[in-house]
Amino acid sequence: EVGMNAQDLGKLLHREPAEIVKKLFMLGVMTNQNQSLDKDAIELIAVEYGINAEEKIHEDISDIDTLYEKQMEASQNSKLQVKRPPVVTIMGHVDHGKTTLLDRLRHTQVSAHEAGGITQKIGAYQVKIDNKPITFLDTPGHAAFSNMRERGAEITDIVVLVVAADDGVMPQTIEAIDHAKSAKVPIIVAINKMDVPGANPEHVTEQLMKYNLIPEDYGGDTIYVQISAKTGENVDELLQMILLQADLMELKADPKQKAIGTVIEARLSRGRGPVADLLIQQGTLHTGDPIVVGNRFGRVRVMTNDRGRQVEKATPSMPVEITGLNDVPESADKIVVFDDEKTARSVGEQRAQQALQQSRENVQHVTLDNLFDTM
Ligand code: GTP
Ligand code: MG
């Protein structure tokens, strides 16, 4: 079962879907355009059209970005959708207090243990407020990590923009606003370090208004909260605002579907092999699920939550760490679950081969270009 229907086959074979349905009917298979077909039905059609449909169909399921999009759409149209926790990305200029804010929410001390006090990767955590979970992504503020901020903005529902009240709008503040805007994600402004003498929230607000973040007092609709991550002042207020914004957005997912998700970070662990931090976006991921992640494949072997506790399943908006992949995937790679390990392996291997081929071609192009340059 590869999740194809008559419409997909029609597209693949350049025929009207109605024609495919009719052909199948004549061959004794009752279906409509949207019903997904089993392998036998697909083979019947392949034989009927006397072409190497097998190969083409295979090509199609190896396009996991399209599979991801299709499953995202299916989940969003599902009648079984239930409320899911918001995914909130904390962004802002270096040292403005993003990790300290998350430490306060989680009762941890991550920021104190970071090399040079600087965050260098995206961290993913879930916090429960009045029994309502919120997933937070902590991004680095250092100028060098622009791609991580961009990624953070792309997989989130809400951006919390942290701006230090004693420092104001800085280059990465502006960059974060740009990422959030191009990802069409609403921004909540948290003016931080209100405990510091010289904190000037009015000045910060004035600066931010130039970027079209207009507070309600001035007739706009951007939520502003003045906080201190250090003392905890108004942090509850900020959380309430996040939950309010999330409620307005009616975020939903169908946990009954196969999981889809995105890689946040991945690395090679000496003892555990390839390890990937994932954000589950729709459906539920189970231990043992055969998966393709970017150009990698495998079975979910061990899954742990953000507190390092082993879990058997991961539901929508949950960040988890998994092992069991054949190699280290890339950040931002998509995760798709397949019915069996054999299919996952063949798709993964095909994708890795294609990627290798692609990079060879790129190298050849570069070499040719270089050649012309020197002539
Ligand atoms: P990067 O991840 O490197 O971009 O920095 P960050 O935004 O995560 O900043 P971090 O939380 O590491 O805080 C930087 C410094 O500011 C630390 O020394 C914190 O203790 C301090 N700090 C954070 N929030 C507050 C606050 O509300 N008040 C005061 N006084 N200090 C704060
Ligand atoms: Mg940090």
Image (tube, helix red, strand yellow):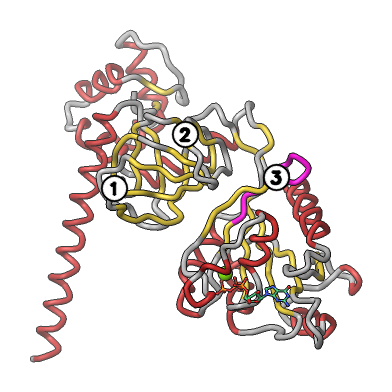
Q: What element carries label 1?
A: loop
Residue beneath disc 3: 128
Label 3 neighbourhood size at 10 Å, few (<14), some (14-19), many (20+)?
A: few
Residue visible at 37% across and 29% down in the picture: 288
Name the outermost residue toward the bottom: 375
Asked whether, in this view, residue 297 is left or right of residue 367, the answer is right
Real-space CA distance between mark 3 and mark 1, rounded to the nearest whole angstrom = 32 Å
Asked whether, in this view, residue 163 is left or right of residue 60, the answer is right
Q: Does the magenta stretch include residue 207?
A: no
Earlier sequence position, callout 2 versus callout 3: 3
Residue stretch rendered in magenta on the structure: 129-136
| Viewer-side label of 3, 1 | 1
The image quadrant where one finds ligand 1 is bottom right
- For the residue pair 274 and 363, the one nearer the viewer reads as 274
| Viewer-side label of 1, 2 | 1
Q: In which quarter of the image is the N terminus?
A: top left
Residue beneath disc 1: 271
- For the residue pair 174 and 374, the one nearer the viewer reads as 174
Tell me the kind of residue under disc 2. Answer: Leu
Label 1 neighbourhood size at 10 Å, few (<14), some (14-19), many (20+)?
A: few
Real-space CA distance between mark 2 and mark 3, rounded to the nearest whole angstrom = 21 Å
Earlier sequence position, callout 1 versus callout 2: 1
Tell me the kind of residue under disc 1. Answer: Gly
Would you place residue 24 above or below residue 299 in this image? above
Image x and y of residue 126, in percent: 61, 48
Residue beneath disc 2: 285
Quadrant hosting residue 234? bottom right
Image x and y of residue 181, in percent: 63, 67
